[in-house]
Amino acid sequence: MSMKKVVAIGIFDGVHAGHQQIISAAKHHGEVTVITFDPHPTSVIAPERTPTQLVSLKDRSLLLKKAGANSVEVITFNKDFASLSPDQFIEDILVGRFSAEHVVVGENFNFGFKAQGTPKYLSEVGPKYGFGVSIIKLQEDRGSTISSSRIRNLIIDGEIERANELLTRNFFLKGPVIHGEKRGREIGYPTANIGLTNLATIPADGVYAGWLSVGNFKWQAAISIGTNPTFPGVRGRQVEAYAIDQVGLDLYDQEATIEFGYRLRDTLKFDGLEPLLAQMKKDCDQARDLTSK
């Protein structure tokens, strides 16, 4: 007997605990194809409100498969797609393209022109098109809904441990290691500066404990985000990680992943190098300790 063709639909940015619940509910019904959208629909409908990303599209696909999706299909979200009526979306996409026999959505899912299609409408017309519908109640945590926007706000506010709980993993940033001002190298703490896209969700300025990975290597790390206020000159925000106890690493131009585990402190401006170095030693000791657990 062949498996039922099940389709789960959503943006799924971050693939957080709530998204994982939708996929595991879908798996009860058969083989799961996840339909996701890129770019983010808001960037087409209201560009000025485009949210930052919790993960890149490539990592979203990997995380969706890890959560149990058999395949991930990306629909390019553009003005033409946004103008499909709810019925066209059902006929062209769900039935025509994916031959859906069961559809699973979160209770806040809307589709079709001006988001006119609702989960309720989907479940009313599903039988006519030959598919069942499951509507998944949104997951709550401490009295409020788990959502990508809530997690984005937690990260931007520096509440990394809370964000990680809702993501069920460590939040990470990825990018090439770029040439910075080489200050860290001069003072005995060479850091990997990460180049990020303008869609990256960057945690609040401060110092964090986590991990730095390049290729098959993964090191405990002290991570700094900010503008290095102790040194003169004006510069943009930088995300840099020091691989604790490592000497002589040359990581330039390689793809690096910085995972955030714990927030240690705010960014401080020091009166000179001595107090800065004393604090950096403390930061590294604390980061080493926390990331050894």
Image (cartoon, helix red, strand yellow):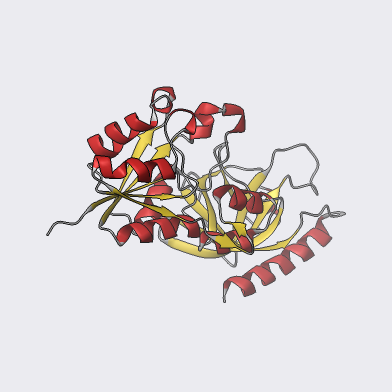
In the rendered structure, the answer to whether residue 166 lies left or right of residue 4 reads right
Residue 38 at x, y percent in the picture: 43, 36
Residue 102 at x, y percent in the picture: 28, 50
Work out whether residue 189 or residue 148 is closer to the camera in this orientation and state it. 148
Residue 95 at x, y percent in the picture: 25, 38
Residue 107 visible, this orientation: yes
In the rendered structure, the answer to whether residue 135 lies left or right of residue 257 reads left
Work out whether residue 43 or residue 293 is closer to the camera in this orientation and state it. 43
Q: How many badges with numbers are in the image?
A: 0
Q: Residue at x 79, y 46 (%)?
A: 231
Q: Is residue 253 above or below residue 164?
A: above
Residue 44 at x, y percent in the picture: 50, 27
Q: Residue at x 14, y 56 (%)?
A: 2
Residue 250 visible, this orientation: no
* Residue at the right extreme, as displayed: 271
Assign the N terminus to one quadrant of the image.
bottom left
* Residue at the bottom extreme, as displayed: 293
| Rendered image quadrant of residue 87 | top left
Assign the C terminus to one quadrant of the image.
bottom right
Work out whether residue 142 or residue 290 is closer to the camera in this orientation and state it. 142
In the rendered structure, the answer to whether residue 22 lies left or right of residue 199 reads left
Q: Residue at x 37, y 61 (%)?
A: 24
Q: Residue at x 68, y 55 (%)?
A: 158
